[in-house]
Image (spheres, grey):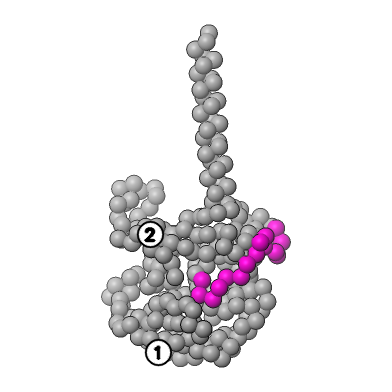
């Protein structure tokens, strides 16, 4: 009679350990860090399709958007902080909150942003662009691009962008006044990104602060197109990108 009781005790203890582990994992991804996979080519060359990265959820404080299921917690963020210009952020799309997107913060609340002939201006000051020579698109290897080093006007941050050439849609915009409580975001693959230059029906429009999930911190690994969690035979289709800090 003691054996069934002992077995039941072991099953109960195992269930408790599993439940504790699941609760810990849910809490960790809810309030600290969350994994995210790059779904498109809009952030080339720094981030490419298949990159598996980690997002810091405490970087800007917490809102409903940064929690599972996007609960309706109002407009404010707990311990809210502004992103810095140049941060790469993951957020919920303003019109399709079930879709996580990733872009770079260019315009802060109150800024006036304009793109002229492919160059970004914020409050009348240009982002410096330095040519790094020709390159190739990672998502479309046969397509040549120009690699440019883009530097914010204060010189504090810089990153690399791709440019397909003059005359692309989005190379010229009117002056865009960023409202309070919102940000303007752009993709680094500047001519292949639906972002803050277009309304939310087409791109992102203005990104509300409450929609921020967190700041992209590091690329842990990267898988080639076609790899899937549900296809174990594809797990080793890696692209040779490991533990890369995101700038």
Q: Circle 1: is it few (<14), some (14-19), or many (20+) Cα within 10 Å? A: few
Q: Position of residue 191 (x, y in %)?
A: 43, 80
Q: Residue 192 sits in which quadrant? A: bottom left
In this view, the residue in front, 117 or 57, is 57
Residue beneath label 2, please? 243
* Residue drawn 35% across the image and 81% down it: 147
Image location of residue 94, percent across then percent down: 61, 68
Label 2, label 1: how far apart the Cα atoms are: 34 Å
Q: Is residue 47 visible?
A: yes
What quarter of the picture does the C terminus occupy?
bottom left
9 to 174, vertically: above or below: above
Residue lying at 34% horizontally and 46% vertically, measured from the top left: 232
Q: Is residue 229 magenta?
A: no
Judging from the image, what secondary structure is the residue with disc 1 in? loop
Q: Earlier in the sequence, mark 2 or mark 1?
A: 1
In the rendered structure, are the residues bearing label 2 and label 1 in contact, judged by CB atoms less than 8 Å apart? no
The local secondary structure at tag 2 comes to loop
**Residue assigned mark 1:** 166
Which of label 2 and label 1 is nearer to you? 2
In magenta, the rendered stretch is 73-87
Is 125 rendered above or below residue 33? below
């Amino acid at each position: 009679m003691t054996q069934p009781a002992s077995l039941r005790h072991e099953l109960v203890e195992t269930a408790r350990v599993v439940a504790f582990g699941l609760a810990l994992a849910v809490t960790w991804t809810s309030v600290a860090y969350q994994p995210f996979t790059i779904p498109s080519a809009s952030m080339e060359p720094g981030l490419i399709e298949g990159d598996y990265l980690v997002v810091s959820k405490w970087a800007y404080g917490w809102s409903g958007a940064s929690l599972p299921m996007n609960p309706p917690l109002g407009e404010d963020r707990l311990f809210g902080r502004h992103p810095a210009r140049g941060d790469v952020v993951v957020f919920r799309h303003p019109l399709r909150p079930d879709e996580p997107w990733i872009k770079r913060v260019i315009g802060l609340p109150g800024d006036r942003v304009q793109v002229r002939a492919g160059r970004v201006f914020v409050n009348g000051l240009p982002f410096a662009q330095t040519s790094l020579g020709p390159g190739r698109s990672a998502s479309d290897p046969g397509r040549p691009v120009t690699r440019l080093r883009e530097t914010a006007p204060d010189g504090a941050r810089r990153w690399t962008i791709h440019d397909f050439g003059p005359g692309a849609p989005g190379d010229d915009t009117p002056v865009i006044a960023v409202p309070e409580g919102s940000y303007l975001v752009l993709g680094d693959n500047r001519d292949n990104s639906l972002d803050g230059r277009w309304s939310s029906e087409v791109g992102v429009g203005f990104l509300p602060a409450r929609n921020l999930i967190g700041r992209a911190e590091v690329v842990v690994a990267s898988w080639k197109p076609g790899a899937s969690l549900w296809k174990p035979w594809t797990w080793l289709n890696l692209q040779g990108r490991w533990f890369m800090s995101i700038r």
